[in-house]
Image: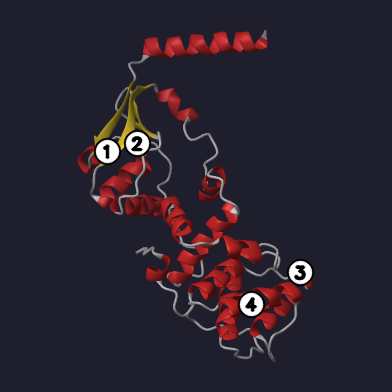
Amino acid sequence: MLGKLTTIHLNSMMKSLIRRTKMEAELIIVTPEMAKRWLGNNPVNRTVKHNHVLNMSRDIIANKWQINGATICICEDGTLLDGQHRLLAIVKANLSIRTHVVQGLPREARDSIDSGVKRTAGDRLIMAGEVYGREQASIANFLISVAHEKARSITASQQEILYVTENHNLVPSCGLSKSAFPKIGTILGGLHYIACYNNYHQKADEFISVFKTGVPTYEHDAAHFAREYLISQEIKQTTVRTEFKRRFVVHCFNKFMSDMPMKASHLPNRYHVPNWRPSSVGINIAQ
């Protein structure tokens, strides 16, 4: 009975909405000029996330923009209700895109917009049947960050992350690194892949093995030093920032790859891995 009442109530609401508004939904080409016009009538909206705008503008320029049913929503009085980031991306890219636009919405529709949970690149990989979907997405983002020498996680778009997973076989590295050592699986998996990419397969496996077993491969083994240092910080209950972990483990990896000894946790100013550049990962992000 409750289900019937709910259905009747919803149908009544929809009929009332249709009577009160003249909604039109179209798949159209939105030009930068149209985007500017709609943005000009945007008095109340969320704070602009500039990195998100950059992500989408790069996708548009790279011809990776996809029609996915998401709509630009315009109120019956012409006010922009949803889509400001997409419109800003169109303006920044200075290119037109095809997208869905709904016009004639009631003002109160704003309250229900963007209330769902957003799908991540990892979610999309899992839905596509990929093993280690979330791990692949995390490692892909790490690989993009390292290629651009950014210790803080770089803001890559979902299309850029998916491009990396499509063009680089990350699955073996995900499998080996997932349970190798707590809280740094993404870093280990990314570094393992970079070593394999540069044809150092045995050294890549040894690097993971040291973290997993605690058995060094040479005197003052850099990977072993990193492992013991992180364990000691955990025992002391010292908070180790993610950015430091990335810098530290990457530095240890670089030393390990050359069998260089490591006795202290001093880090160089530059955060990079030799022979891993934007051209290696296939993504070039200018921010």
Of badges 1 and 4, nearer the viewer stands: 4
Mark 2–mark 1 distance (CA, rounded to whole Å): 8 Å
Residue 237 got which mark?
3
Mark 2 crowd level (few <14, some 14–19, many ≥20, 10 Å Cα) = few
Task: Tell me residue 182's x, y (percent).
Answer: 71, 65
Marks 2 and 3, Cα distance to the nearest angstrom? Answer: 48 Å
Identified at 32% across, 30% down, the residue is 101
- Rate crowding at label 3 as few (under 14), some (14 to 19) or many (20 or more) other CA atoms within 10 Å: few
N-terminal label among 4 and 2: 2
Quarter occupied by the N terminus: top right
Label 1 and label 4: CA atoms lie apart by 55 Å
In the image, residue 154 sits, relative to residue 107, either above or below, namely: below
Q: How is the image coloured?
A: secondary structure
From the image, tell me which residue sits under label 2: 43
Identify the mark at residue 40; answer none if there is no mark. 1
Q: Residue furthest right?
A: 235
Which amino acid type is shown beneath numbered disc 1? Gly
- Asked whether the beta carbons under mark 1 and mark 4 sit within 8 Å of each other, the answer is no
In the figure, 6 relative to 40: above or below? above
Q: Earlier in the sequence, mark 4 or mark 3?
A: 4
Helix, strand or loop at mark 1: loop
Looking at numbered disc 3 in the image, what kind of residue is underneath it? Gln
Q: Position of residue 78 (x, y in %)?
A: 29, 27
- The type of residue carrying mark 2 is Pro
- The residue identified by callout 4 is 207
> Callout 1: 10 Å neighbours few (<14), some, many (20+)?
few
Residue at position x 69%, y 85% in the image: 217
Task: Determine contact: label 2, label 1, CB under 8 Å.
Answer: no
Type of amino acid at the residue the image marks with label 4: Phe
